[in-house]
Image (cartoon, rainbow, N blue to C red):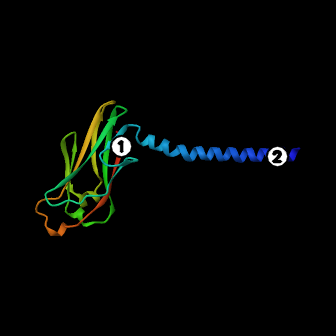
Amino acid sequence: MNKVKSKDKILLTIISLFLFLSIVVIFIPLISQSRNNRYFRITSNEQVVNNVISINDLSLEPGNSKSSKIELECISSNKYKLTLLFQEKETGMLKDYLDVEVYYNNDLIHKDNLNTMFNSDGVSIIDDFYSGSNYEIKIIYILPNDIGNEAQGAKTKFDIEILIEQE
């Protein structure tokens, strides 16, 4: 009888441990994702995963541009520092020719070459944000008119990570 109860206890312990680990594996990513987004809801015309926007197809002709729009809905009023970090994913020559303009609520706040932005501390916005309010960041990628054949067929892939800190 004691052997049967002992085996039942071991089996019950193993099942309990398995259930606990299953719950941890399922819910930890959800909890950490909600912590990252506890101040803002972030949407974009590009794919957003864990506060990272991936730019995978930026083939442009001279004189053309493409834009990414990031919409922020503030959840908790406070003063925040938002930083956009440009991180190269795949080496490509287009980065040397592209100009990037960053607008915050329609005001130009930064303009630079994409390659320079890859090697910088990012673009930061420090502002008072109010719960329930919406804010917009627009990033425009421009291939200047004076770029010739050297940019023909050039491509680049990169991420823009959105870091949010309370000030």
Percent of width and height locating residue 165: 36, 42
Q: Position of residue 49 (x, y in %)?
A: 39, 48
| Circle 2 residues within 10 Å: few <14, some 14–19, many ≥20 | few
Label 1 amino acid? Answer: Ile
**Residue at horizontal 27%, vertical 37%?**
135
Residue type (three-letter) at the residue carrying disc 2: Ser
Q: Position of residue 23 (x, y in %)?
A: 59, 43
Residue extending furthest toward the right: 1
Quadrant position of residue 166: top left
Which circle's residue, 1 or 2, is located before the other in the chain?
A: 2
* Helix, strand or loop under label 1: strand
Count of number-bearing discs:
2
Above or below, 95 relative to 165:
below
Per the image, label 2 sits on a secondary structure element best described as: helix
Task: Name which residue lies at 33% across and 42% down.
Answer: 43
In the rendered image of this protein, does residue 30 appear above or below residue 116?
Answer: above
Residue 119 in view of the camera = no
Residue in the foreground of this view, choosing between 47 and 163 = 47
Q: Residue 139, image x and y in percent?
A: 23, 49
Residue on which the image places disc 1:
164
> Is residue 11 something that shows in the picture?
yes
Q: CA distance from mark 1 to mark 2?
A: 52 Å
Q: Residues within 10 Å of mark 1 (few under 14, many from 20)?
A: many
Residue 65 has which mark?
Answer: none
Nearer-the-camera pick, 47 or 42: 47
Residue appearing at x 37%, y 33% in the figure:
75
- Assign the C terminus to one quadrant of the image: top left
The quadrant in which residue 96 appears is bottom left
Q: Quadrant of the N terminus?
A: top right
Residue 6 is labelled as: 2
User: Of discs 1 and 2, which sits in the foreground?
Assistant: 2
* Horizontal arrangement in the rendering, residue 31 relative to residue 38 (left or right): right
